[in-house]
Image (cartoon, helix red, strand yellow):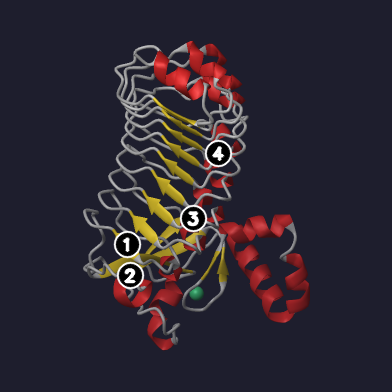
């Protein structure tokens, strides 16, 4: 039934082969002779593998195998250096074979929605041109940190999974524009999300979030969905601590950082270029009240801000709890005597000193 179609392509200048909805169980080997093909569409068949020589289609830019019976993403695609789009949603893919992403330097779109994936291999970090990645409706419990190497990534869909953690370096995705992580089991978002300066759409609905990370209000979201999370309410327990007792390391680092900044600004600027100092700074924070540096010990508080005012979002639904970190119980007690940045409507309601390793 499909041989005449392939024959027509063979004798024409067409660069597209569309064999969708042909009840195919086996993909004809003859396809591999159509070396000028740029698009192969095999959607809605019953295929579970591609011919061994499929890698001969060196001009291929689009492979659409959605709605089939594949259990493994076909390894032959690693030999297709011009492949830009792979649409493999609605299959039964459990495995992404090792090394499969190695040759896909042109890939910009990868859609693996509605499969049976439990993990994404670290090699995904090699897809240096990937702009759109979607793996919704799978069984993912985590994502590799290497995902954050995808510097061109603009859209990430990983909703409807079982994610309990999210890569800490999310903030290094400087081109990320849309992030969909709804319907997972996340209890917190990475602190670095506030560095995703291009982010305009964020969907975190139906997770286990109770507070948003420090400086979350720096984002300029146009669409923000956060319903169905057990968000903090404002009736928290007040702090019971009166005095601060800090270990020596914490005191020394605080003293050194603050003194350098205050009295030796030039040396401080050049020191900040050093990798070891940057690593220390990344672990620490500045107190919202006194602006002083603190390293491992944080006095965790919640502030509630208005989504409409703070995020400029079109979907405000009330006050959003955001984590703020103070250096000490002393600053918590003194909060009313300090003037605080006017763009945050600070409403400190709870204190709890926490040692973050
Ligand atoms: Zn302070």
Between the residue at mark 1 and the residue at mark 2, the CA separation in whole angstroms equals 6 Å
Q: Mark 4 points at which residue?
A: 107
| Mark 1 secondary-structure assignment | strand
Q: In which quarter of the image is residue 42?
A: top left
Residue 224: assigned label: 1
Between the residue at mark 4 and the residue at mark 2, the CA separation in whole angstroms equals 32 Å
Mark in front: 4 vs 2: 4
Mark in front: 3 vs 4: 4
| Mark sitting earlier along the chain (1/2) | 1
Task: Work out whether residue 253 or residue 42 is closer to the camera in this orientation and state it.
Answer: 42
Q: 10 Å neighbourhood of mark 1: few (<14), some, or many (≥20)?
A: many
- What residue appears at the point 46 percent right and 22 percent down from the top-left corner? 8
> Residue 304: percent from the left, percent from the top?
31, 71
| Mark sitting earlier along the chain (4/2) | 4
Asked if the residues shown at circle 3 and circle 4 are in contact, with their CB atoms under 8 angstroms apart, the answer is no
Between the residue at mark 3 and the residue at mark 2, the CA separation in whole angstroms equals 17 Å
Q: 10 Å neighbourhood of mark 2: few (<14), some, or many (≥20)?
A: many
Q: Name the residue under label 2.
A: 313
> Residue 106: percent from the left, percent from the top?
60, 39
- What residue appears at the point 38 percent right and 34 percent down from the top-left corner? 140
| Mark sitting earlier along the chain (3/2) | 3
Between the residue at mark 1 and the residue at mark 3, the CA separation in whole angstroms equals 15 Å
Q: Name the residue under label 3.
A: 176
Asked if the residues shown at circle 1 and circle 2 are in contact, with their CB atoms under 8 angstroms apart, the answer is yes
> Residue 287: percent from the left, percent from the top?
50, 72
Q: Is residue 286 visible?
A: yes
| Mark sitting earlier along the chain (1/3) | 3
Q: Is residue 248 visible?
A: no
Mark in front: 4 vs 1: 4
| Mark 4 secondary-structure assignment | loop
| Mark sitting earlier along the chain (3/4) | 4
């Amino acid at each position: 039934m499909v041989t005449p179609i392939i024959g027509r392509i063979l004798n024409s200048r067409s660069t597209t082969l569309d064999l969708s909805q042909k009840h195919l169980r086996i993909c004809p080997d003859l396809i591999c002779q159509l070396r000028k093909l740029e698009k192969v569409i095999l959607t809605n068949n019953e295929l579970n593998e591609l011919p061994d020589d499929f890698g001969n289609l060196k001009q291929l830019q689009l492979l659409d195998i959605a709605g089939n019976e594949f259990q493994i993403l076909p390894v032959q695609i690693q030999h297709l250096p011009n492949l830009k789009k792979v649409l493999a949603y609605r299959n039964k893919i459990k495995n992404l074979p090792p090394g499969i992403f190695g040759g896909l330097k042109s890939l910009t779109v990868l859609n693996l929605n509605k499969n049976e994936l439990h993990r994404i291999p670290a090699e995904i970090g090699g897809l240096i041109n990937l702009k759109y990645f979607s793996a919704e409706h799978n069984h993912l419990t985590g994502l590799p940190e290497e995902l954050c190497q995808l510097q061109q990534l603009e859209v990430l869909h990983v909703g409807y999974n079982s994610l309990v953690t999210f890569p800490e370096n999310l903030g290094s995705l400087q081109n990320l524009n849309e992030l969909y992580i709804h319907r997972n089991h996340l209890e917190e978002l990475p602190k670095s999300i506030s560095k995703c300066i291009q982010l305009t759409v964020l969907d975190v609905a139906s997770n286990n979030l109770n507070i948003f990370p420090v400086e979350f209000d720096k984002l300029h979201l146009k669409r923000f969905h956060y319903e169905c999370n057990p968000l903090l309410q404002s009736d928290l327990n007040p702090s019971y601590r009166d005095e601060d007792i800090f270990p020596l390391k914490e005191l020394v680092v605080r003293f050194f950082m603050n003194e350098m900044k205050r009295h030796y600004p030039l040396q401080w600027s050049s020191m900040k270029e050093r990798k070891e100092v940057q690593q220390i700074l990344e672990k620490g924070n500045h107190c919202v009240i006194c602006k002083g540096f603190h390293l491992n010990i944080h006095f965790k508080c919640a502030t509630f801000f208005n989504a409409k005012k703070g995020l400029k979002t079109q979907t405000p639904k009330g006050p959003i709890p955001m984590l703020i970190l103070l250096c000490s119980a002393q600053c918590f007690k003194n909060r009313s005597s300090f003037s605080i940045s006017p763009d945050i409507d600070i409403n400190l309601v709870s204190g709890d000193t926490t040692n973050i390793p």
